[in-house]
Amino acid sequence: MKKVLLIALLSAASIVANAQRYEYGPPQPMDGPEGDIGRLRFGVFLAPTVSWLKPTANKSDDKLYIVNSEGSKAGFSWGLMMDYYFEPNYGIATGFSITSGGGKISTRLNPNVTPPYADNIVESTYFDYKLQYFDIPFALKLRTDELPGGIRLVGQLGISASFAVSKRADYEVTYTDIDASGNTVEKTVKADKEKIEGTGITPVLMQLNIGAGVEYPITEKLSLYGSLFFNNGFAPDVTSPKDLDLDYKGKFSDGNTRLNNIALRIGIFF
């Protein structure tokens, strides 16, 4: 993960250096929206987010567990924006960001299905995942001509590759175990901010990004930017409970889950 961050930062630095060298070349036309054609624009943003985990079905794939989303989590995102316009109203948007979020999900044993095993049966679970991802987006960006006051409406559609930086969870799991006398007993374990190793949470996530907002010029080169984004994690499955190695016995499944979030970006282009 540190290598990915280092490569991204070095790449951004290289682009900035090239863009700065380009500024000393022949002057570019600056009359109207054509002034942005062939020129990189850089910006920074902050964004409060609301994220949630959504099961694609109300039962796990093996039908043993009933699965429910248990609400959303407030989070935060920040990062660097880079735009390159190849036409006055059409461009490519990329950059990178760090996004914190997660979601809450519960499972309970399906009373209509008998487990194929007798020992260490997970009866119910509640997980509050606390996740952080490093995102690299690639999107088509659209904008209108200048409206009164210089305001432009903007839209964006693309995908992003997200790499897990931090994976933790609060959880409560009830399961059956065998005591010293050979009897089956019920046990419950709880933990806070437990670190998740391996592939219990997917290390790489692909997301679909849809955004719409406005740009407002302050000076010839400086613009305020605001946009509302919906980010839909579509592949792969975010959680994989069978790969969790935590302080309880037994395995369970929560089916296919997707990580989604809504973000309100407030930034500035310069």
Image (cartoon, rainbow, N blue to C red):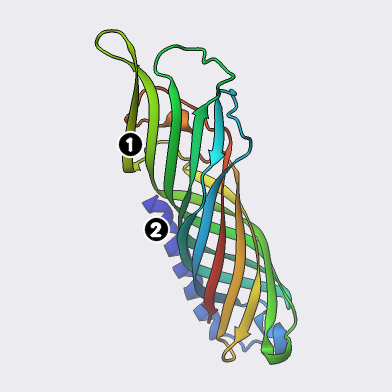
For the question of whether residue 118 can be seen, the reply is yes
Dividing the picture into quadrants, the one containing residue 123 is: top left
Q: Residue furthest top?
A: 182
Q: Which mark is residue 6?
A: 2
Residue pictured at 32% horizontal, 32% vertical: 189
In the image, residue 78 sits, relative to residue 166, either above or below, namely: below
Q: Secondary structure at mark 1?
A: strand
Dividing the picture into quadrants, the one containing residue 58 is: top right
Q: Which mark is residue 177?
A: none
Q: Secondary structure at mark 2?
A: helix
Q: Position of residue 222 (x, y in %)?
A: 55, 86
Badge 1 amino acid: Lys
Q: Position of residue 199 (x, y in %)?
A: 44, 36
Per the image, the residue denoted by label 1 is: 190
Dividing the picture into quadrants, the one containing residue 153 is: bottom right
How much space separates mark 1 and mark 2, taking CA atoms? Answer: 36 Å
Q: Residues within 10 Å of mark 2 (few under 14, many from 20)?
A: few
- Toward the viewer: 39 or 208? 208
